[in-house]
C-alpha cells in the first residue's frame, strides 16, 4: 500500500493505492484498488489494466480526476507538498493516456 497526504498541517486527508492484483477473467487483467480518506465524499474503487502497471496508472488517473473535482481542491484546502500548482497532486493526467 502507498499513501499520499495532501495537507501540510496534518495527515488526516489523502489517498491510498494498493499493489495491483491479477484478476480471474476470460482475458488476463490486473486491478489496482484505491481509496481516499478525510474528504467529504470519500471514494473506494479499483481500476483495471492489461498488466499491473496499466492498472496502477489507470487508478492514479481516476484519483487525479476525483481530487481536482473535489470540494476540498476547489476551496484550496488540499495541496501536495511536491506540487507545482495547487491542483498538482503528482499523478498522471487523464489526457496523458496514449502519449
Image (cartoon, rainbow, N blue to C red):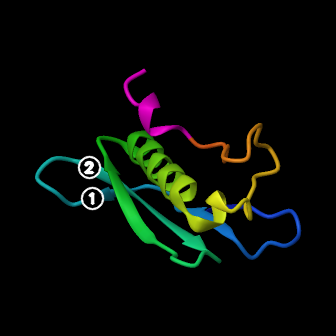
Q: Position of residue 27 (x, y in %)?
A: 15, 47
Q: CA distance from mark 1 to mark 2?
A: 5 Å
- Which residues make up the magenta segment? 92-99
Q: Is residue 98 magenta?
A: yes
Left or right of residue 75: residue 98: left
- Which numbered circle lies on residue 39? none
Left or right of residue 56: residue 15: right
Query: Quadrant of residue 47 in the image?
Result: bottom left
Residue 1 in view (yes/no): no
Toward the left, the furthest residue is 26
Q: Residue at x 51, y 57 (%)?
A: 69
Q: Which residue is mark 1?
A: 23
**Dot 2: element:** strand
Q: Residue at x 55, y 63 (%)?
A: 70
**Dot 1: element:** strand
Query: Which quarter of the figure is the C terminus placed in?
Result: top left
Q: Which residue is mark 2?
A: 29
Mark 1 and mark 2 residues within 8 Å of each other at the beta carbon: yes
N-terminal of the pair, mark 1 or mark 2, is 1
Query: Which quarter of the figure is the N terminus placed in?
Result: bottom right
Amino acid at each position: 500500500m502507498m499513501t499520499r497526504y495532501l495537507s501540510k498541517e496534518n495527515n488526516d486527508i489523502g489517498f491510498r493505492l494498493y499493489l495491483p492484483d491479477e484478476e480471474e477473467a476470460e482475458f488476463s487483467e490486473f486491478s489496482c484498488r484505491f481509496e481516499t480518506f478525510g474528504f467529504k465524499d470519500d471514494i473506494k474503487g479499483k481500476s483495471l489494466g492489461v498488466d499491473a502497471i496499466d492498472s496502477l496508472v489507470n487508478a492514479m488517473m481516476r484519483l487525479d480526476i476525483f481530487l481536482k473535482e473535489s470540494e476540498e481542491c476547489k476551496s484550496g484546502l488540499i495541496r501536495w507538498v511536491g506540487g507545482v500548482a495547487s491542483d498538482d497532486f503528482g499523478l498522471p493526467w487523464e489526457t496523458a493516456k496514449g502519449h
